[in-house]
């Protein structure tokens, strides 16, 4: 039986991490890589990863049409965007070539809420081509949505869901430092935040939308806030520095309401060196109802590895799925792949 | 659109609990109930439950053929047995009438391990009749298997899984007190245990089998132990009493190995009034690998409500499933049903 053939589009931290993970897995092969970064174009991906492997060489190519034509891929891992509207044309191109798609775009985790028309089109195009498309990652995708949904499986009634992810930004690079306001002066933060010019976490609307759809709540009101996390002491991480009085990160919060009653409470404070603020990291889900469920994962699941793993681990589910746009609540539970990936393909 | 039509076979603690839960849900109707207990036969189920409801009356009937003929059910909740071989004829009867089945039998959570031939037959019969059959519950079914599988979704590599469920037996009745050795003298326990005459927890082999299949481990060795939990002080629960020096319960443990290496470690100490032994209850999953995941649910998820909820909540997934024998790793994640059940049927 032929190996599962994977195309990777976008070879930054996520795409290259997926390639590294795939090299350790059996029954799967990377058949094409598209990336436009001048440091990577034209290079063998194993040299970019700085690994030794008997995996066939794949030269990184910036022309996606050439990559697709040469690859005959079963599935593409698309790690280029956060927003559906930016990923849309790429997804359509892949679907029209009858290639299943796993996207890291946070909005793609539940595109029905922010891009319902694009979601409808992607579903139609996927069905017309007999393939499927899924957005996933650690968050949105698992920790602040699917995992909570799974835990409600043992409940007769759900009154309220709190998802709280307290994580460290210390492992992340310069781009994340900037997006999350690390080191920023409070006045600057207030100015940018008032103008809506700070990204912060993308995905609350999607997580709430996914959970509401799964449980059958009609969320008719959604609110989101971003507040500064000001440090009392100097904090330093490999790529970030926050002087005392400045931002160590931001605290994103959101709420989803049904008929004026809060059903979902999302809390996601992210900062460098949280221990210097007396903060213990972790993922917490508290579900009020019958029975109540009070879950903690300590420390939090690593976001970078987690997203890479979720995308790779969902490959068999996406290939096996009936055609169309899928979200995590449509497919079997995610799982690590410790055997031959071919054995998981129906 | 017609309501989802549910038949209940077995109206003990589980079956009657599912009926109570269904009465609170929209878009679903109980259309037949089979139970042979003389206290219940011939009675309207609402009188047995002692509830007031505008749900149509259903008289409990001990003749399953009459119940099936009068019901036109979409799905049956079968809450009669723990072992596949005892549930088998009942399951086949339902499948042959083209009724989907959700079974509480612990072995049915993953019948391939203990009853592979019966599993094969059920799969064939279900497919021949265009319906599906699933075994589920809180454990096996979620807490010591599916939830661990779900958490591995964010992992690149899994080395070892520990599932530990520390729960109180205090809410349970006389049958459970006897099965779990509550109040027993140590000599009696040792004698019965040596003869294999104490049931303890049923489901470790199924949970390990399910997790191994999901992750791709080839478990070639399985071991299980039962040890007494001797109390230092007198303990009293509504249906149990353990004098100091006697058993407050039993500690069931199991291990699954691949090529001599332990991959799964199952720990399930059950006792009355655990706080009197200084024991905090909870559900714990610790997964070694990349990244590590360390999860705790405290206190533990209530086992009775949990099993009732899992069975009811899986009804839409079982109706929507393609035909055949299914386990929890084949279907979308379980979830509470807070809206109209009809909206979940494809």
Image (cartoon, coloured by chain):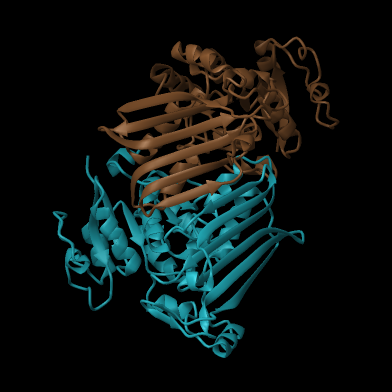
Chain colours: A brown, B cyan
Q: Is any part of residue A88 visible from this angle?
A: no
For residue B342, above or below residue A172:
below
Q: Is any part of residue B63 visible from this angle?
A: yes
Question: Residue at the spot x=32%, y=64% of the render?
Answer: B15
Question: Residue at the spot x=39%, y=38% of the render?
Answer: A214
Q: Quadrant of residue B32?
A: bottom left
For residue B115, above or below residue B1:
below
Q: In which quarter of the image is the C terminus of chain B?
A: top left
Q: Give percent across and percent down for residue A57.
A: 81, 23
Q: Give percent across and percent down for residue B216.
A: 66, 49
Q: Give percent across and percent down for residue A83.
A: 51, 18
User: Which residue is at the front of the view, B95 or B59?
Assistant: B59
Whether residue B231 sits left or right of residue A19 in the image: it is: left
Q: How many marks?
A: 0
For residue A123, above or below residue B230:
above
Q: Give percent across and percent down for residue B18.
A: 31, 59
Q: In which quarter of the image is the N terminus of chain B?
A: top left
């Amino acid at each position: 039986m032929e190996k599962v053939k994977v195309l990777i589009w976008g070879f930054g931290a996520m795409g290259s991490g997926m390639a590294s993970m795939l090299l350790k897995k059996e029954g799967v092969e990377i058949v094409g890589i598209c990336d436009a970064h001048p440091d990577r174009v034209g290079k063998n991906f194993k040299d970019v990863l700085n690994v030794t492997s008997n995996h066939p060489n794949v030269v990184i190519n910036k022309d996606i049409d050439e990559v697709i034509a040469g690859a005959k891929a079963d599935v593409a891992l698309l790690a280029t965007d956060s927003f559906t509207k930016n990923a849309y044309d790429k997804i359509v191109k892949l679907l029209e070539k009858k290639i299943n798609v796993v996207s890291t775009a946070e909005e793609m985790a539940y595109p029905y809420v922010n891009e319902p028309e694009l979601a409808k089109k992607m579903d139609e195009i996927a069905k017309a081509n007999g393939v499927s498309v899924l957005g996933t990652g650690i968050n949105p995708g698992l920790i602040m949505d699917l995992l909570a949904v799974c835990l409600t499986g043992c409940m007769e009634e759900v009154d309220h869901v709190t998802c709280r992810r307290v994580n460290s930004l210390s492992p992340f690079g310069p781009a994340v430092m900037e997006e999350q306001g690390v080191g920023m002066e409070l006045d600057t933060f207030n100015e940018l935040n008032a103008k809506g010019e700070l990204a912060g976490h993308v995905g609350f609307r999607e997580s709430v939308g996914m959970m509401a759809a799964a449980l059958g709540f009609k969320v008719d009101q959604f609110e989101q806030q971003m507040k500064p996390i000001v440090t009392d002491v100097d904090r330093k991480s490999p790529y970030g520095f926050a002087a005392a009085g400045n931002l160590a990160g931001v605290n994103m919060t959101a709420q989803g309401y049904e008929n004026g009653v809060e059903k979902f409470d999302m809390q996601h404070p992210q900062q460098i060196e949280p221990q210097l603020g007396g903060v213990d990291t972790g993922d917490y889900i508290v579900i009020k109802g019958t029975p109540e469920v009070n879950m903690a994962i300590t420390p939090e699941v690593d976001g970078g590895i987690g997203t890479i793993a979720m995308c790779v681990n969902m490959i068999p589910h996406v290939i096996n799925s009936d055609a169309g746009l899928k979200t995590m609540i449509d497919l079997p539970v995610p799982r690590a792949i410790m055997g031959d990936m071919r054995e998981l393909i129906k």
